[in-house]
Amino acid sequence: MRFSTRKFIVGCFTVALFGIAVPGVAAPLASYLRPEKVPAPDNNKVTPERVALGKSLFFDPRLSGSKWISCATCHNPALAWSDGLPTAIGHGMKVLDRATPTIINTAYQRSQMWDGRFRTLEEQALGPIQADVEMNQNMAMLLDEIQSNKGYIALFEKAYPGEGVNKDTLAKALASFERTIVSTESPFDRWAKGEEKAMSDAAKRGFALFEGKANCVACHQGFNFTDDGFHNIGLKGSKDPGRYAKKAIKSMQGAFKTPTLRDIALTAPYMHSGTYKTLTEVVEHYNRGGDAHDNLDPNVKPLNLSKQEVDDVVAFLNALTGVLSAVTVPRLPL
């Protein structure tokens, strides 16, 4: 496959090949395109059998203590693998403090959850199941229930021969399914490969601003448009300690993980608190340099974008959205 060799050197920062913003160094457009392989650990390579098991578990409400909340309740494929709510609703209809992040492209992330509390998808998979405010399930009881289900026993044996039904194989199966949830080709991707008309002129101007005057690449870098870092972006009224609760460093006070921008047009509302309903509101937030300045990330500062420039950046963000893959709900084992 031959990629376009066009490069852009605009403003102070552009994306470097390895995902680091470097002054005055332009990134080849190919560096924004998806890697050939989805990463997976050596002890949990993705196979059709593991994906089939993980998919059944993902859509099964019996994984929750109430028997009515599944992973898909919050991560709904019809809502770009989120829930469309400002913040999540958990066990007992409790409204939680943070928004449900999409799980699109989580396989490429270096940490999971808004505060990065889990390193891998395998670690993350069991967190919400056992959290009392989310799925509120007792792990020992859940494993007993699965082990009494002949359909699941057969699926586990096919997926993990000889390993049995336990919390490790449960986590690995869920992670295997989640590794198949990836973004599809977007207008930006087609343009980056040389299809000049794939993006509008407004989106092209927005990309130049994204790399330059708007300095979005300070945090949104590489194929997945994230630095996998944590930043306090100055949200008004936010008292959530964010990453600081897990890593007590001053710069992490009120800091949250940079989300992917892939399929961003489908994952409103935005921010960890679901504060903004539209992408225009998001860009305007950064344009004014945030609203709360205590411990504000140094990259967040007034941008002085005109209304046209704000609209152009939004046009580019929309061009990062592909077509959601069709998903069929599995027949659950009895």
Image (cartoon, rainbow, N blue to C red):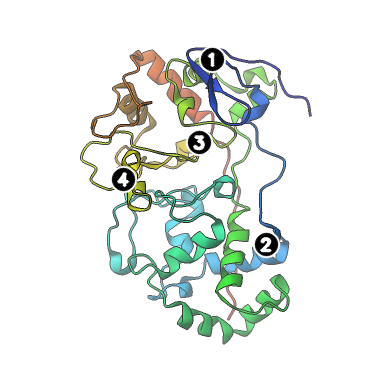
**Residues tagged 3 and 1 counted as in contact (Cβ below 8 A):** no
- Marks 3 and 1 sit apart, C-alpha to C-alpha, by 27 Å
Mark number displayed over residue 201:
1
Callout 1, which amino acid? Asp
- Marks 4 and 3 sit apart, C-alpha to C-alpha, by 20 Å
Q: Is residue 268 left or right of residue 289?
A: right
- Marks 2 and 3 sit apart, C-alpha to C-alpha, by 25 Å
Residue labelled with disc 4: 273
Please tell me which of labels 2 and 3 falls first in the chain: 2
Quadrant in which the C terminus appears: bottom right
Q: Residues within 10 Å of mark 2 (few under 14, many from 20)?
A: some
Q: Is residue 113 left or right of residue 235?
A: right
- Marks 4 and 2 sit apart, C-alpha to C-alpha, by 33 Å
Q: Residue at x 47, y 73 (%)?
A: 63
Q: Is residue 86 left or right of residue 292?
A: right
Indicate the secondary structure of the residue bearing disc 1.
Answer: helix
Residue labelled with disc 3: 227
